[in-house]
Image: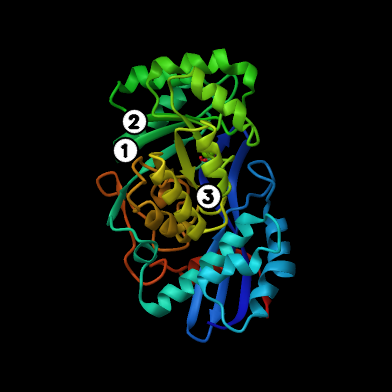
Amino acid sequence: MKIERVSLRRIRLPLVAPFRTSLGVEHERPALLVQVTTAEGEGWGECVAGADASYSSEYLEGAEDVLRRHLVPRLLATDSVSAHAVAPLLAAVKGHRMAKAALETAVLDAELRALGISFATGLGALATRVPSGVSVGIMDSVPELLDAVETYLAQGYRRIKLKIEPGWDVVPVRAVRERFGDDLLLQADANAAYSRADAPLLARLDEFGLLLLEQPLDEEDLLGHAALARRLTTPICLDESVVSARSAADAIALGACHVVNVKPGRVGGYLEARRIHDVCAASGIPVWCGGMLETGLGRAGNAALAALPNFTLPGDISASDRYYATDITEPFVLKDGHLEVPDGPGLGVAPLPDVLAAVTTAVSEVR
Ligand code: OSB
Ligand code: MG
């Protein structure tokens, strides 16, 4: 495919409720959409970089800048681009995985749409629906948290993830476990808010039978995670620390995790995400699909990825209305606690023109 032009579109979506984590609180989701146009048709990708650089070093304006100056021009200068060629073409630019992921996704979407093949089929996935989990933010009080969890469970969510931070950990986890019982699939995510010295405190979570504890320590502290994994009975899961198939393999070899959260944006795209799935499968490490408050575009790709066989734990792939009153695509809805994996060509969904126009704050083209 020859890429003719690439549009970079900034959108802003209000959240149905504030989402608080140890990294901060979000009231809306500003996002960057990448649209590639080829002679064979178009494709879309969503960049998951946040407004600030609190989750990773990437942030929205930075992602837009590197796309415009360094990434898109490399593809425009190439006569024929396939999705598998994107990462090698962009490899001379270090890092910026979320920006690269958005561009590769748009090319993959265009390619698969032209071929009439769905993302799920293109990735090698067979499942037609995936179990849906929900990530529950830090609340002002335990009763408020219990109400939120009760509402999600009533909607059918199959697994609850509680965001934790120092001062909001043992007490809310105990409260949820006691209220909803031992059968509830429950896990916690610290977003790197603890240090090695907190091991005794984190060990107190062991009594609650969590599926896993996600990213308790700094993203670079693999040895700290390995020490914690030896000390706790709760399985350690890595999110921020795993940025590639190589780093996943290293973390596993060091004993730093028993489970991996796979987010396509964090690792540079769906093709690398697939490789992480494969590396983990070969090592007997289960994976699940994380989320970054994606719109329907990113949610569609994530549902396809999560349909791969080693995604044996429910992911943070909730229905559109978990975050958005109006999604930019046809909304993903919960059916019996699951989301359907789109089976149309490419991502199988596309932005609805009216909604897209209403939430767009800026568009620019790179040719
Ligand atoms: O750590 O998984 C995380 C959202 C933003 C940044 C980091 C994380 C999250 C979530 C939300 O937990 C998951 C979702 O999209 O529902
Ligand atoms: Mg996480």
Q: Look at the numbered discs 1 and 2 and tell me whether their residues touch, using CB distance below 8 Å.
A: yes
Cβ of mark 1 under 8 A from ligand 1: no
Q: Give x and y (percent) for residue 115.
A: 39, 78
Decide if residue 278 is in sight here: yes
Q: What's under tag 1, amino acid-wise?
A: Arg
Which element type, helix, strand or loop, lies under badge 2?
Answer: loop
Tags 3 and 2 touching, CB below 8 Å: no
Front position in the image: 250 or 128: 250
| Precedes in sequence: disc 3 or disc 2 | 2
Amino acid at dot 3: Ala
User: How many labels were placed on the picture?
Assistant: 3
The residue lying furthest to the bottom in this view is 39
Measured as percent of width and height from the top left, residue 110 is found at 48, 75
Secondary element under disc 3, as helix, strand or loop, is helix
Relative vertical location of residue 14 with respect to residue 225 in this rendering, above or below? below
Q: Is mark 3 within 8 Å of ligand 2?
A: no
In the picture of the structure, the residue carrying the numbered disc 3 is 245
Q: Determine the image quadrant of residue 66.
A: bottom right
Rendered view: 20 above or below 40: above
Q: Nearer the viewer, residue 48 or 88?
A: 88
- SS for dot 1: loop
Return the residue at label 1: 158
Dot 3 alpha-carbon crowd within 10 angstroms: few under 14, some 14 to 19, many 20 or more: some
Closest to the camera, between mark 1 and mark 3, is 3
In-image side of 346 versus 156 (left or right): right
Res 19 quadrant in image? top right
Query: Label 3 vs label 2: CA separation?
Result: 27 Å
x%, y% of residue 91?
66, 63
Residue ranking furthest to the left = 336
> Which numbered dot is residue 185?
2
**196 displayed left or right of 323:** right
Say if 324 sits above or below 256 in the image: below
